[in-house]
Image (spheres, rainbow, N blue to C red):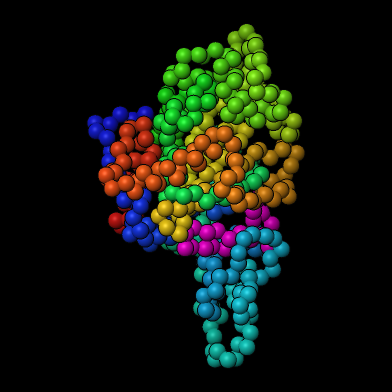
Amino acid sequence: MTDLAAPVRVPASRYTSSAFAELEHERVWPRVWLVACTVDHVRNPGDFFEFRCGRYSVIIVRGDDHQLRAFQNVCLHRGNQLCEGSGSGLAEIRCPYHRWAWDLRGSLREVPSRKGFGVLDSNELSLVAARVDTWGPLVFVNLNLQAEPLSDYLEGVVADTAWADLDDFQCSYTTVSRVDSNWKVVADGFSETYHVQGIHQEMLASMDDVNTEQHVWDRHSVSHQRYGVASPRVRDHSDQAVWDSFLVTQGERMGPGFPLGSTAPTPADGETIRDVIAQLIRDHQATRGVDMSRFDTDGVLRLSQYNLFPNTTVLVWGDMLNVLTSRPGSSPDDAELVMYLMYRRPDAAGTDSEVRPFDVVLPPDASVGTVIDQDLSMLKKFQKGLHQPGFTHLTLSGEECRIINMHRVLSRYVAD
C-alpha cells in the first residue's frame, strides 16, 4: 500500500460524460495494445476471430503460412463489415455484399465485374492492417501501425511473470457479459482489494487483503496477495476457518472431493494449512496430467494481479490464469466484460494440441461464481451513484494506487 499526503480526486464526469467517452474513442482505443482473444482461438491456418472494442472491429486470422495477421474489419469497396464472430477453415476474406475478396494476407484477389471500375490498383486496395502480437496465451491488437512493440508496451510485466511459464496455459472458455456501467467502473473493480472487506467477506479468512504488495511501472501495475492465510481484519485464524473460507471461494481448485463443511486436514509437522491446500491443488492438477512440483506453496497460493492499461486485469496463479477485460459499450453507461479461464496444458499434450475455447455470451442473470457475482452486482449501483449531481469527484487512497495510475496514464493519452 502507498500512503499519500492527501487523497487523489478524479472527476466523476470521466465515467458519465459522452464528450469524455468520445475522447477515449479518438485518442485511447486506436492507440493502445488491447487483449483481443487467445492463441487457442487462432492456432491453425484458416482460424479467424473478430475483435470488437466500441465502434472498432478487427479481424485476426492465421494465414496458410501460419503467420498471425490483423486487419480492420471493413470492405474497401463501400465499407461493409467483412467478418463476424469466429471460426475455422477460412480460405479467403470475402465481402458478403458485393463479393469482393482478399486472401488471408490481406491482398485483393477478386473484384466481380472489375472492368466496370476502370483501372483498379490492387496494391492500394489491400485490407487495412492492424498490429498483432502475442504474450503467453493472449493475442493483442493495436490499430496504430506506428505503435511500439508489445514487449516494450508491457514494460516490466513480462519479466515479472516469467516464473509462471505463461505459454503453458490454454484457454478453456470465455464469457461475455453486458454490464450497466462505464468500462472504467468494471476495470476499477479488479484494481484494488480495498473492497474485499465490504462485499467479499467470505474471502477474509483465507486471504491477506491488508499486507498487499503493490508495484506501479509507467502504464501498468501489479499487486501480490497471499491466499491460504487469514486477513488481519478477522479474529479467527484457525486452520478450520481458513479451510472453510477457501472451500467457499476457491474450493474447485482442489478438485471435487472436498464438500462445504468438511473438516480441515491436519497439517504434518512443520507444515501449515496453507501448505496442505497447495499440495491438494498440485494433486488435483496431477489428475489432469499436469506436474506442478516445481511450484512451492507461495507459487501456488500467491495471486499476482496485473492491471494492464487501459482495461485488462490478468490474474496469475500457479495452476490457473484468469483474464478480465472491459470494453466500452454504446454509451458511457454500458460496457462489456470479457472473461477468460485458462489452465495449464497437460504435460503430454503438445503446444499445438487441438483445444478450441468454448465462447458464450451470458444472459443477465447468469452466475459466474460467488466472488465475480458479488462484483457484478455492484456495478449498476456504481453507475447510478456517479450520476448524482452532488457527487463531483472520486476520492482515492494510496491503497487504490492502481486506479490512480490508470487515470494518470489516461490523462496523458486524452490530452496528447
Which x, y percent locates residue 310? 42, 49
* Region rendered in magenta: 38-60
Q: Report the residue at 58% width, 91% height from top.
A: 116
Vertical arrangement, residue 100 with respect to residue 224, above or below: below
Q: Report the residue at 52% width, 79% height from top.
A: 78
Which x, y percent locates residue 335? 47, 52
Query: What is the count of numbered marks?
Result: 0
Is 53 in front, or is 344?
A: 53
Is 300 in front, or is 206?
A: 206
Vertical arrangement, residue 304 with respect to residue 82, above or below: above
Which x, y percent locates residue 385? 36, 44
Location of the N terminus (image quadrant): top left
Is 354 in front, or is 154?
A: 354
Q: Report the residue at 62% width, 21% height from top.
A: 277
- In the rendered image, residue 44 lying in the magenta stretch gets the answer yes
Q: Report the residue at 49% width, 26% height from top.
A: 201
